[in-house]
Image (spheres, grey):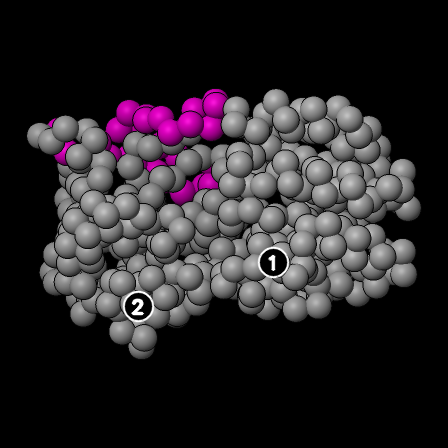
Amino acid sequence: MHMCLSCFYIDGYSYQENEIVAQNVKDGHDVVVLASTETFNDKRELDYLSASSYMGSDGARVIRFDYWKWLPHKIARKIRGFHGIYKQLCAEKPDVVLFHGLCAWELLSLIRYKKNFPDVRIYLDSHEDFNNSARGFVSKFFLHYLFYRTIFRMSLPYVEKVLCISKDTTLFVSDFYGAPDTLLEFFPLGGAVLSDGEYVGRRERAREQLGVKPEDLLFVQTGKMDSVKKIIESLEAFSSVATSANVKFYLAGYLYDDIKERALELIASDDRIVYLGWNSTEDLRSLLCAADVYVQPGSQSATMQMSLCCRCVVMLDDVLSHKPFVTTNGWLLNAEMSLERAFAEAVRSYENRKIYEMSKESHRIAAKLLDYKKLSQRILV
């Protein structure tokens, strides 16, 4: 059982919750997802579904629950209390539970279930860190420290491990939530590590469809593009450094209003820059196989892991959580390694063919740390 009550579970996406669920199904397990009604609408904005039960796109049964009706919705969705969770746990009788996220009242329902069914193995999966959680005083002190943290600490005697998706998350859970180091384990967001044959086939097909020649150097940046993603900085650095016609920069994602006008100006001013719009998961995977270098100078994104699984060389913001994934396969962007310098070094690495060895290193890192076929087994042992 995957309990996605502290986070959203969205059909048709490639988030960690989807990927592990899908892999558990492929491995022959009977899988059920207990989820909130949160989803994304066509504009990639938060929306809500009706409570329901159905076969989800990842091959598992999905049961969605309403928030408590006796509280205002804004409060209930922060407390993350739902109608009928304990009853559903008793009906399903799971052998293993992965509770995604640490911030929910319903951890208490899971503790209650563990007390009555002690053989169940419970894993908690944390995505929280100070980049995405506890950022304001009220949120930090009242919601996280007094409420979520208290419930989390009550659960600790009943869980096998707390699986942390990043080094920043590990510090957050240890230092702020007070989890003992013996319970913490690094459990990064992963991806599908492609075989040589599938990678080469996807790369050749995608480059042909995109109009990218075999001799071209292709940079790619993806995602929900706003000011914190630094897409403007990327475009300006690319145009100022990369002058060859054989160097391309493709963008895939959604341009937010705060940067859209300037971004479209920069795209229109350089015919080597192509904006593809929003891509499906499989189209994005093919685009990353076609790419040589994945660019992510701003806030963190799960697409970074997918890019490594697609053997991209990477240009990433120099933050703690990125350090395990960059050795000789790319550049960490900081005061000394500017975007302009990283673009220039990537071009030189391509010209002297070093970029092919860098790509092999990305593949090695992905196979070691990010393969969902391996990560999905963690909760079964």
Segment colored magenta: 41-69
Question: Residue 62 in magenta?
Answer: yes
Q: Mark 1 near mark 2, Cβ–Cβ under 8 Å?
A: no
- Going from the N terminus, do you reach mark 1 or mark 2 first? 2
Dominant secondary structure (helix, strand or loop) of the stretch shown in magenta: loop
Question: Residue 111 in magenta?
Answer: no
Q: Residue 344 placed where, x, y %? A: 79, 53
Q: Residue 323 placed where, x, y %? A: 56, 65
Q: Find disc 2 in the rendering and name its residue.
A: 174
Spatial distance from mark 1 to mark 2, Cα to Cα?
Answer: 27 Å
Q: Quadrant of residue 32?
A: top left
Q: Residue 255 placed where, x, y %? A: 57, 28
The secondary structure type at the circle numbered 2 is helix
Residue drawn at x 88%, y 60% is 353
Query: For this view, does 16 lie left or right of residue 119?
Result: right
Residue drawn at x 18%, y 70% is 157
Residue 253: in sight, yes or no? yes
132 and 121: which is toward the camera:
132
The amino acid marked with disc number 1 is Asn
The secondary structure type at the circle numbered 1 is loop
Query: For this view, does 78 lie left or right of residue 220?
Result: left
Residue drawn at x 15%, y 54% is 146
Looking at the rendered structure, which numbered label has been put on residue 334?
A: 1
